[in-house]
Every structure is written in structure tokens, then in C-alpha cells.
Amino acid sequence: MNHNNIENIIFDLGGVIINLNIENTFKKFSEIFKKELKIDIFNDHKKYSFFRDYEVGRINDHEFRTSIKGLADLPIEDQLIDDAWIAMLQDIPKDRISWIYESTKRYNCVVLSNTNSIHVKYFENFFNKVTPYGYPKDVFQKLYYSHEIGERKPDNVAFEHVLHYSGFNPEKTVLFDDLKENLASAKKLGIQTEYVERNQLRRDQLLDGNK
């Protein structure tokens, strides 16, 4: 990482810390529903607003599952929906998490993620199970989950929330994210940025040049 005067890091979650494959979820849904469910609906916030509503806490787990069931023409068990929804969350490579852990000893590190309660419950338990560092709250200074703060990226207010409550100076803060629209919004607020190719965080992006 060659950013000058960096004191703080904002990490995205899916695609940066934990590997992400959204297609897996929609393949599972298609199998369960016995009809093709395309990934395109995930980002169609006008027609399928419940995905966004769930991410910002406007609807709860039950309401989300009910919305998913509305896409099917047959009764679906809640556990099947949860299993399919979680299927997009993959592994956490050991080398990657060791680099991130090392970075938390050098910088103030927080997480800002567009996520939801089903994913968070799974992620936090999985993190504790597969890493030697305890739960995410034991590693990061703060975890800002969109469904808890009521805001999501790339909306500026999500980044403003993190800057305000963490007390970060944007000029001394860098965002690691795999979506360029999120990086573009952060830049407008003066936050430095580091594009991470999905599931491909490199050690030199975090630590080289800061030994």
C-alpha cells in the first residue's frame, strides 16, 4: 500500500475479507424453485426492492423470506431459503486473513458492508470457526453493517456515518472495496481508495512499503 499518511482502513466484507460468489445463491434458488432465477434481480431495486430494503433494515428476516417465497410458485421451507442465501459466502483464505490481522495492528481498521442479519450471523460464526482471531469484533475497531446503520454503499451517507462515528479524517483513510461505484463515492468525500479485484486481495495492497 503506497498511500501517504494513511492511519485508517475501511474494509468491504464480501469479495475483500470473505470470498463471494453471488451466482451460487441464484443457482440454489433456481434449484429450489424449479425455475430459473437470474442474478439480475439482485440489483433491480425498482422491481425487487426487498433486497435493498433488507440491506438497510427496512424489513426483517421473516419479511425477507416471505418476499423470496413470493418469487416461487410452491411452498419453501425457511431453512432452504437461508441455506441458498448463505451460499454466496465462500471461504476466508488463511494468508489473506493473516495480512488483514497484521494491518489491524498498524492501522485503525473498520468494516463497512452492504449486508443483512442472516449473512452477518453466518459470517461472524464462520469467522470464529476458521480463523484463530476470535470473532470479527475482536479484530476490527468497529463493524458497520448496512442493515444496522440504515445506510448502504455507494450512498455518501454510509461513508459519512463511518467517518463521523469512527472519528476518521477522510484524507488519512483508505477504502478497500471490490466495487468501483463504491470507490467513486468514497473519493468524493476525500477518502483514498484501493480497488480490490473480487476475491483477490493482495498482500502488497495492504502491507508492502509499510514494514
Image (cartoon, rainbow, N blue to C red):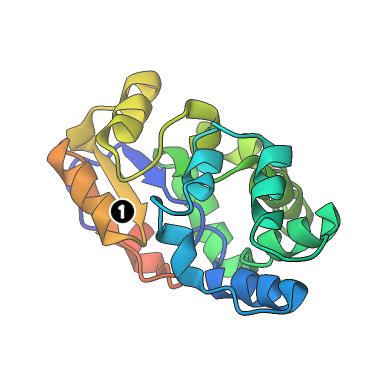
Near mark 1 (Cα within 10 A), the count class, few <14, some 14-19 or many ≥20, is: few
Residue 149 is situated, as x and y percent measured from the top left of the image, at 48, 27
Residue 105 appears anywhere in the view: no
Amino acid at dot 1: Asn
Q: Residue at x 42, y 48 (%)?
A: 11
Residue 151 is situated, as x and y percent measured from the top left of the image, at 41, 33
Instruction: Name the residue beneath numbered marker 1.
Output: 210
User: Going by the picture, which residue comes out furthest to the front?
Assistant: 73
Going by the image, does 6 lie left or right of 89? left
Q: Quadrant of the C terminus?
A: bottom left
Q: Quadrant of the N terminus?
A: bottom left
Q: Residue at x 45, y 49 (%)?
A: 103
Viewer-proximal residue, 97 or 153? 153
Q: Residue at x 37, y 58 (%)?
A: 206
Q: Quadrant of residue 36?
A: bottom right
Viewer-proximal residue, 173 or 71? 71
Callout 1 secondary element:
loop
Residue 210 appears anywhere in the view: yes
Going by the image, does 181 lie left or right of 88? left
Q: Quadrant of residue 147?
A: top right
Residue 173 is situated, as x and y percent measured from the top left of the image, at 27, 39
Going by the image, does 211 lie left or right of 147? left
Viewer-proximal residue, 51 or 159? 51
Q: Residue at x 74, y 54 (%)?
A: 126
Q: Is residue 195 depicted above or below 4 in this figure?
A: below
